[in-house]
Image (cartoon, grey):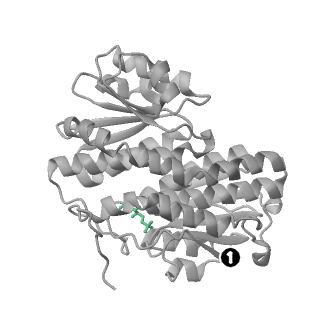
Amino acid sequence: TKAHKGGYKHFMAKEIAEQPVVIAETIRCYLPSGGDMIDLKEADLDFSKVSRLTMVGCGTAYYACLTAKYWFEQLARLPVEIDVASEFRYREPPLPEGSLALFVSQSGETADTLAALRYCRGKADHILSVINAAESTMARESDIALPIHAGAEIGVASTKAFTCQLVVLLILALKAAADRGTMSAAQIAEHVAALRSLPGAVNSALEQSEAIRRVARHLSEASDVLFLGRGLMYPLALEGALKLKEISYIHAEGYASGELKHGPIALVDTDLPIVVLAPSDGLFDKTMSNMQEVIARKARVLLITDEAGVAAAGGDVWSTIAMPAIHPALAPILYAIPAQLLAYHTAVAKGTDVDQPRNLAKSVTVE
Ligand code: AGP
């Protein structure tokens, strides 16, 4: 059946707006009420026997892997290696005993990711994939395929697949923490409760669309944009920059806030808008001090934070977007929404082809 835009101007807008519903569905599938958290026993996967997790993907899927690295390391104390598939497959990485290889892909058909999966066959103890297309080649060739239940994604820029990938990866990290005894039952229950409130928070985030559209009008005149984030917001800074590049053709870079003074601060002037992603978590003060460094050099800062963050940031920021307060572990999923909306409205303001950006294919099935 042919996909419809359902009243939206673009598939991307529709897919951004669908996120409260599809995220709720993903959560329902992996955390059935009253049921057990994701059961992998059938597949004979016990995270207490895993010595290292290797995660591979391309583009946005790779940024999902980078986000999940923080979760698996912090929550489950599991060593994690990640790489983009095109590098991984040719660098002949050794996979030590007890390796679990995990591939993330919306399409399940990306040539480099599939080749990386095949490289791991016979070398890793288990091959897992987190995919949207349940009937894909990667799903078939994995020991365990975990579908993200996002529904068909038509827009070339990945949106709802990213947030649903993150939901599945976070639940998997919680499962790993349970197997490895690194979190108490109460701590896991706290994260699960936070996940259950996520669709509502995503809904509130979508209500900022109009405010983001107003800022995007200014952003559409920039030739370069810098995205900054720390900790779990660092992968999202990279993803926000990728989204903007893909559909608005504005050059954008994501940077770890702490890396600023190791180079990119030389670029900072009035013509370089800087998007700072900073929920008021344990790293907030550090990110704020980086933000003050660029404000002192006259940069225009768009701060994406929560109410407490807006209050703490002071008056020198050019513009702020407030997200609802959220459990810090879930912030990358929630803050993906304003990053997507910012790219979307900027592209619309520029008049580019949002759903079919030049030179790009939805699924890259050749090297
Ligand atoms: C995302 O907006 C991109 N269009 C692209 O980076 C994409 O995520 C990448 O090509 C991977 O695709 P996959 O998830 O289908 O493997």
- Residue located beneath label 1 in the image: 122
110 sits left or right of 2 in the view:
right
Front position in the image: 224 or 84:
224
The three-letter code of the residue at mark 1 reads Gly
Q: Is residue 154 visible?
A: yes
Figure label count: 1
User: In the picture shown, does residue 309 fall above or below 362?
Assistant: above
- In the rendered image, the quadrant that contains the C terminus is bottom left
Q: Quadrant of residue 144?
A: bottom right
Q: Is the CB of mark 1 within 8 Å of ligand 1?
A: no
116 sits left or right of 13 in the view:
right
Residue at 69% from the left image edge and 46% from the top image edge: 73
Q: Quadrant of residue 38?
A: bottom right
Residue 50 position in % (x across, y down): 77, 61
- In the rendered image, the quadrant that contains the N terminus is bottom left
351 sits left or right of 175 in the view:
left
Residue furthest to the top: 296
Residue at 33% from the left image edge and 63% from the top image edge: 14
Residue 219 position in % (x across, y down): 23, 37
Residue 306 position in % (x across, y down): 49, 32
User: In the picture shown, does residue 136 fall above or below 72?
Assistant: below
Q: Is residue 91 visible?
A: no
Residue 185 position in % (x across, y down): 83, 50
Residue at 55% from the left image edge and 21% from the top image edge: 285
**Crowd class of label 1 (few under 14; some 14 to 19; many from 20; radius 10 Å):** few
User: In the picture shown, does residue 75 fall above or below 111?
Assistant: above
